[in-house]
Image (spheres, rainbow, N blue to C red):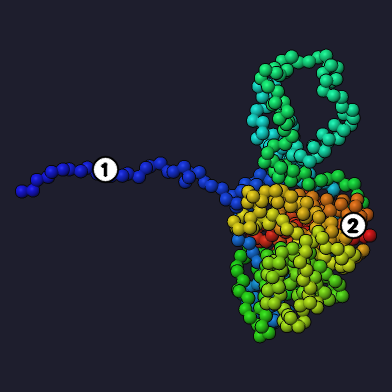
């Protein structure tokens, strides 16, 4: 009979019913930060409409198919039409017939006299400044009676220069310490230092004039200040006279509400790909640029290349200069051109198609281009909500993000100088931000007039964007000053895309 000598009791380890703190507390990623920023900013600007735009931005966007004229054009068009796609040219022709039948008094009924977005941005700026003050001063007034400022100032260089200027103006003659003590009869005895405790600390003390770690920090409210409303430069806004869709250009889309996907491009008999897929709103800036035969055209921020390829597909250009700041982006652009242009090396590279690697703010071929496309870097609203990589809302890129309007205005102002008198450009962004859109256009126009005496004319495209009303959802004119904008909309999920056409006068 077996005898049990020792009994070991092993308690069962039960899993805790509580979830760990790192599971309960969701860690924000770059896309979450972008969405929070948009909810606050665009929710204040667009009101109740932001919910629909938000849903569209968080959904996969629609594409259009641009047929390659250097491939099997007829076969590609037949394939796309059999799949149910519609040629944009036919939709534009139908819209033009409707427009011609409308009474003349209805076509000019929309006005741009009042811009309700100005008041919304002013209110948003004040709210953001109150948040920043509250973050530094948690209470309205501290125990010692100190009252926090209404607005924080982070311009350390200017403050130091002002202090130096005031010091030079007020302290032209500095008496010695002994004479100063003798002349000052109202000494605060409580602040005198007893010599028996040493006086070495007096010579080591240095008053603080800045906060460590705040040198490169930029307040969020500083971003909204780029949007200005005062006009202190000559400004004229005139309707665009005509719009002609390029005869040889074929772009296909699905009707509004149809979110079908296009087939992948196939290789043609000529060795190039059959069609190019791109966001539908991206075709509008190069279309409204209206390039003509014999013109010299610049694409200031060309990569990844869809807009440049569209201008080449019009078969109008004598020379196109594609510029970008990074070599990697230019290499991507070259690959696109090699895939879609027949006999690329012999007929295009270095002849009709030129590449340039430079910051668009530093281009110096002034008054040498007939047309310029200025598709500037921006917050790329749809990209930052869907992709973690290369996200501008990364915490280490906050200063870069808040300074984007300065970069955009610098590029646009320099491109206005590159235009010939009488030439025109189209400025575009893929952002809903009024600061990066109308705000940057205003800054650039003001800059070129005050520094170089260049005057411009804004070409109002409202009448011609109505031709695309069956394809896109456009922002109402009273919310925009200088341009037009495609809004994200679930049945027609293109954009966002803002564009403004500007003609140089002098």
Q: Give 464 or 390, whichever is nearer the viewer.
A: 390
Does 146 sit above or below residue 226? above
Numbered marks: total: 2
Q: Residue at x 87, y 24 (%)?
A: 175
Q: Which residue is mark 2?
A: 456
Which residue sits at x=86%, y=63%? 364
Name the residue: 83% across, 69% down. Answer: 297
Lateral position of residue 12 relative to residue 331, left or right: left
Query: Camera-side residue: 72 or 371?
Result: 371
Question: Mark 1 — residue?
Answer: 11
Q: Quadrant of the C terminus?
A: bottom right
Q: From the viewer's perspective, is residue 35 above or below residue 69? A: above
Residue occupying the point 89% across, 57% down: 457
Within 10 Å of disc 1 (Cα), the crowding (few <14, some 14-19, many 20+) is: few
Residue 107: quadrant of the picture: bottom right
Mark 2 or mark 1: which comes first in sequence? 1
Which residue, as the protein is rendered here, is positioned at the far left? 1
In the depicted view, which residue is nearer to us: 203 or 301? 203
Q: CA distance from mark 2 to mark 1?
A: 83 Å
In the rendered image, the residue lying farthest to the bottom is 269
| Other-residue count near label 2 (Cα within 10 Å), few / some / many at <14 / 14–19 / ≥20 | many
Q: Is residue 182 among the parts visible in the rendering? A: yes
Secondary structure state at the residue bearing disc 1: loop
Quarter of the view holding residue 357:
bottom right
Q: Position of residue 95 (x, y in %)?
A: 77, 66
Mark 2 or 1: the one toward you: 1
């Amino acid at each position: 009979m077996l005898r049990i000598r020792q009994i070991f009791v092993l308690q069962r380890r039960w899993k805790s019913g509580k979830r760990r703190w790192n599971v309960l507390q969701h860690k924000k990623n770059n896309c979450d930060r972008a969405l929070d920023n948009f909810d606050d900013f665009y929710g204040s600007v667009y009101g109740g409409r932001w919910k629909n735009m938000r849903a569209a931005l968080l959904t996969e966007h629609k594409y259009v198919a641009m047929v390659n004229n250097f491939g099997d054009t007829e076969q590609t068009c037949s394939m796309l039409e059999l799949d149910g796609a519609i040629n944009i040219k036919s939709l534009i022709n139908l819209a033009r017939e409707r427009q011609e039948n409308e009474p003349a008094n209805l076509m000019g009924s929309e006005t741009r006299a009042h811009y309700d977005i100005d008041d919304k941005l002013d209110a948003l700026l004040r709210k953001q400044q109150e948040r920043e003050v509250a973050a530094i001063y948690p209470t309205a007034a501290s125990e010692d009676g100190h009252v926090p400022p209404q607005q924080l100032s982070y311009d350390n260089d200017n403050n130091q220069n002002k202090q130096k200027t005031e010091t030079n103006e007020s302290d032209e003659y500095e008496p010695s310490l002994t004479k100063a003590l003798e002349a000052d009869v109202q000494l605060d005895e409580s602040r005198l230092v007893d010599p028996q405790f040493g006086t070495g600390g007096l010579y080591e003390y240095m008053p603080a004039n800045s906060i460590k770690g705040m040198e490169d920090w930029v307040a969020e409210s500083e971003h909204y200040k780029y949007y200005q409303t005062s006009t202190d430069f000559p400004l004229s806004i005139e309707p665009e006279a005509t719009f002609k869709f390029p005869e040889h250009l074929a772009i296909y889309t699905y009707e509004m509400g149809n979110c079908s996907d296009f087939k992948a491009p196939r290789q043609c008999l000529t060795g190039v790909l059959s069609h190019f897929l791109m966001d539908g709103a991206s075709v509008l800036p190069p279309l409204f640029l209206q390039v003509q035969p014999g013109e010299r055209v610049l694409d200031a921020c060309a990569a990844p290349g869809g807009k440049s390829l569209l201008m080449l597909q019009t078969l109008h250009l004598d020379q196109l200069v594609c510029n970008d700041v990074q070599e990697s982006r230019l290499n991507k652009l070259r690959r696109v051109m090699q895939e879609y242009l027949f006999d690329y090396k012999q007929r295009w590279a270095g002849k009709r198609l030129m590449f340039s690697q430079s910051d668009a703010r530093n281009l110096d071929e002034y008054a040498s281009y007939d047309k310029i496309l200025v598709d500037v870097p921006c917050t790329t609203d749809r990209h930052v909500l869907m992709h973690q990589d290369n996200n501008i809302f990364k915490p280490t890129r906050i200063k870069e993000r808040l300074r984007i309007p300065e970069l955009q205005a610098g590029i646009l102002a320099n491109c206005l100088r590159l235009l010939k008198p009488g030439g025109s450009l189209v400025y575009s962004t893929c952002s809903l931000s009024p600061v990066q859109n109308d705000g940057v256009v205003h800054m650039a126009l003001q800059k070129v007039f005050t520094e170089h005496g260049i005057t411009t004319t804004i070409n109002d495209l409202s009448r011609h964007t109505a031709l695309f009303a069956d394809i896109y959802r456009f922002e109402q004119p009273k919310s925009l000053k200088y341009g037009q904008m495609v809004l994200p909309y679930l049945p027609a999920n293109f954009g966002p895309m803002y564009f403004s056409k500007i003609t140089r006068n002098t």
